[in-house]
Image (tube, rainbow, N blue to C red):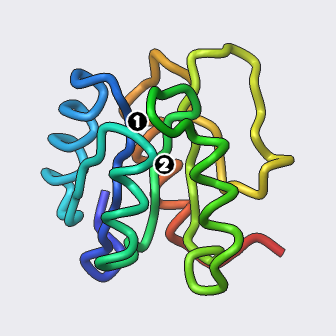
Amino acid sequence: MSPVASSSILVVDDDHDVRDILNRVLTRAGYEVRLATNGREALDVVTVRAPDLIILDLSMPVMNGFEVLSALRVNAQWAKIPILVVTAMAGYSAAHLGVRGTLVKPFNIVDVQAAVRLALGPPPV
């Protein structure tokens, strides 16, 4: 997987193992990866420097993924950041949330890589 112009990706998940796996895979692929353990931390990171893509868990303590999506959507700059959501709910589709894709835990790394490439590409028509 070749990174899109050294894109930066923010991984937001309260599960240490998920953050670690995504961090290793995406860093190895050449992406700049930043990590957050909950939604509040994610918004702090986005405030400092918006990433090119956010991989966002929907179910987290402190501030869940739905709350993060709402906060991102009210800011004109942040609303344009492509988002992949991560969920443990098999068969769940978050397309109605205006995100680029849904990754269901446990996910396949090849699927993650493909979803990241698609999400960083041009917006769907």
Q: Residue at x 44, y 40 (%)?
A: 112
Q: Amino acid at mark 1?
A: Val
Number of marks in the image?
A: 2
Query: Furthest residue to the front?
Result: 62
Percent across and percent down for residue 13 are 38, 34
Residue position marked by numbered label 1 in the rendering: 110
Residue position marked by numbered label 2 in the rendering: 114
Which quarter of the image is occupied by the N terminus? bottom left
Question: From what the image shows, is residue 18 above or below residue 96?
Answer: above
Question: From what the image shows, is residue 75 above or below residue 18?
Answer: below
Q: Amino acid at mark 2?
A: Ala
In-front residue for pair 18/1: 18
Question: From what the image shows, is residue 53 above or below residue 29?
Answer: below
Q: Residue at x 25, y 49 (%)?
A: 35
Which image quadrant is residue 43 in? bottom left
In-front residue for pair 82/36: 36
Which image quadrant is residue 83 in? bottom right
Percent across and percent down for residue 66 are 66, 42
Which image quadrant is residue 79 in? bottom right
Image position of 125 (left or right of 52): right
Q: Residue at x 58, y 25 (%)?
A: 87
Percent across and percent down for residue 68 are 57, 51
Categorize mark 1 by other alpha carbons within 10 Å: few (<14), some (14-19), many (20+): few
Marks 1 and 2 in Cβ contact (< 8 Å): yes
Mark 1 lies on a secondary structure that is: helix
Categorize mark 2 by other alpha carbons within 10 Å: few (<14), some (14-19), many (20+): few
Mark 2 lies on a secondary structure that is: helix
Between marks 1 and 2, how big is the CA–CA gap?
A: 6 Å
Which quarter of the image is occupied by the C terminus? bottom right
Which numbered circle lies on residue 74?
Answer: none
Percent across and percent down for residue 17 are 23, 21
